[in-house]
Amino acid sequence: MVCDRVGILNKGKMVAVGKIDELIGAGTKSTEITITGLSREGLEELEKLRIENKLLGDKLLLSVEGDEKVEQAVELIKSKGGKLISLVPHKETLEEIFIKELGED
């Protein structure tokens, strides 16, 4: 059996309680985008947007924070001839929320 609600205690005080989905939230922490075939000009423009990137063989792995930047990156990739292979949103983990809640003491 898996619990469907959790609580976070800090020095005996309940600092957060709710369903895991509610605590984690609907938003994303960052988005991982994998692409291929991007022109040199496109790569330079990604760097201007301050988007982290790492070359993995013939693929480029991007780490993008914020929905607006994700949209900008996807538009740039399409306009510069790149091919989008995957787009994976990463949510904040329950552990990260726990650490954040304890740090707000």
Image (cartoon, rainbow, N blue to C red):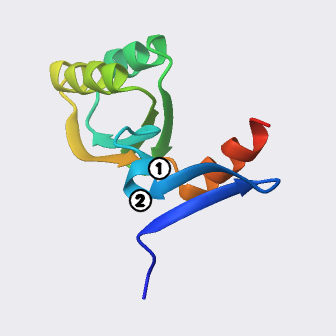
* Residue 92 higher or lower than 78, as above or below: below
Q: Give the residue pinned by disc 1.
A: 23
Tag 2 secondary structure: strand
Identify the residue shown where x is 24% and y is 26%: 77
Q: Give the residue pinned by disc 2.
A: 19
Left or right: 105 with respect to 65? Answer: right
Q: CA distance from mark 1 to mark 2?
A: 6 Å
Specify few, some or many for label 1: CA neighbours under 10 Å numbering under 14, 14-19, or 20 or more.
Answer: some
- Quadrant where the N terminus is found in the figure: bottom left
* Residue 45 higher or lower than 9, as above or below: above
Residue 85 at x, y = what percent? Answer: 23, 48
Specify few, some or many for label 2: CA neighbours under 10 Å numbering under 14, 14-19, or 20 or more.
Answer: few
Identify the residue shown where x is 17% and y is 18%: 79
Left or right: 89 with respect to 97? Answer: left
- Quadrant where the C terminus is found in the figure: top right
Q: Quadrant of residue 5 in the image?
A: bottom left
Q: Quadrant of residue 75 in the image?
A: top left
Residue 51 at x, y = what percent? Answer: 47, 24
Name the residue nearer the viewer: 47 or 74: 74
Residue 47 at x, y = what percent? Answer: 47, 17
Q: Amino acid at mark 2?
A: Lys
- Tell me, yes or no, whether the two marked residues, 1 and 2, touch with CB atoms within 8 Å: yes
Residue found at the far front of this picture: 13
Tag 1 secondary structure: helix
Q: Quadrant of residue 34 in the image?
A: top left
Q: Amino acid at mark 1?
A: Leu
Identify the residue shown where x is 58% and y is 49%: 16
Residue 7 at x, y = what percent? Answer: 58, 60
Name the residue nearer the viewer: 101 or 87: 101
Identify the residue shown where x is 45% and y is 76%: 3
> Which circle marks residue 12 in the picture?
none
Name the residue nearer the viewer: 55 or 32: 32
